[in-house]
Amino acid sequence: MMASGTSLGVELVTPTERVWSGEAQMVSARTVEGDLGILPGHEPLFGILVDGKVSIKATDGAVTDFAVHGGFLSVANNRVSILTESAD
């Protein structure tokens, strides 16, 4: 397990369910401004997601990819919140 402060708390949700929730080493996503890679300590940001892939690398090293359809991503205080219309 990674030490506190060196991981990201991540929540990926749709209007109907919590799709993924937990601690991660990294999150990557595509926004209207381009591709983002989010690591612990990332500056706060708010992004608009485009249809594409969100990839979450958990603290155990497992990588899970989701096909998302629009939505928003916010980063603050080592917390990443992703709200999307749907995630497959």
Image (cartoon, rainbow, N blue to C red):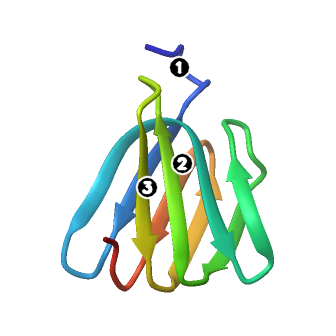
Name the mark on residue 65. Answer: 3
Residue contact at pointers 3 and 1, CB within 8 angstroms = no
- For this view, does 29 lie left or right of residue 21? right
How many C-alpha atoms fall within 10 Å of the one at disc 2: few (<14), some, or many (≥20)? Answer: some
Q: Residue at x 51, y 16 (%)?
A: 2
- Report helix, strand or loop for mark 1: loop
Q: Position of residue 41 (x, y in %)?
A: 73, 37
Alpha-carbon span between mark 2 and mark 3: 18 Å
Q: Position of residue 24 (x, y in %)?
A: 49, 36
**In the rendered view, would you say 59 is above or below 27?**
above
Q: Position of residue 54 (x, y in %)?
A: 52, 62
Q: Amino acid at mark 2?
A: Arg
Q: Amino acid at mark 3?
A: Asp
Query: The N terminus lies in which quarter of the figure?
Result: top left
Name the mark on residue 26. Answer: none
Q: Residue at x 48, y 61 (%)?
A: 81
Which residue is label 1 attached to?
Answer: 4
- Report helix, strand or loop for mark 3: strand
- For this view, does 53 lie left or right of residue 48? left
Q: Amino acid at mark 1?
A: Ser
Mark 3 or mark 1: which comes first in sequence?
Answer: 1
- Report helix, strand or loop for mark 2: strand
Which residue is label 2 attached to?
Answer: 79
